[in-house]
Image (spheres, rainbow, N blue to C red):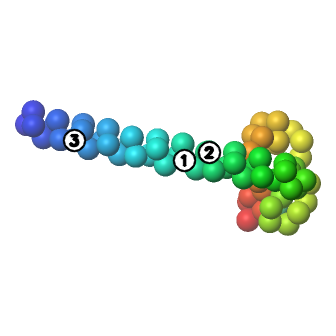
Amino acid sequence: MQYANFVLKFGERELLDEFEIVSRASERQRIHAALNRITEGEYGYCIDCGEEIAPKRLTADPAIALCLDCLRG
Ligand SMILES: [Zn+2]
């Protein structure tokens, strides 16, 4: 029983670690993409429809890439 608990905990931990690595990598990618858009002069515009992204949303998440309409699909 103890062993099963250990495996369960260990498995969970591994999953959590993996999740953290993935989300960290995609966060880095998001920020990198935002920096690219600044360089290209496209920062602040939706990458899908080209509409301006509300400044309030950019303040909340500076790496945001989609306007609210495109985000909602
Ligand atoms: Zn859009």
Q: Is residue 9 left or right of residue 27?
A: left
Q: Quadrant of the N terminus?
A: top left
Question: 21 and 58: which one is in front?
Answer: 21
Q: Residue 28 sits in which quadrant?
A: top right
Residue 8: mark in rendering: 3
- Determine the CA span between mark 1 and mark 3: 26 Å
The type of residue carrying mark 1 is Ala
Does the CB distance between marks 1 and 2 fall below 8 Å?
A: yes
Residue 63: % across, % down: 74, 45
Residue of label 1? 25
Q: Residue 12: horizontal and vertical position, in percent?
A: 30, 41
* Crowd around label 2: few <14 · some 14–19 · many ≥20 (10 Å): few
Quarter occupied by the C terminus: bottom right
For label 2, the residue is 28
Distance from Cα at disc 1 to Cα at disc 2: 5 Å
- Label 2's element? helix
Q: CA distance from mark 2 to mark 3?
A: 30 Å
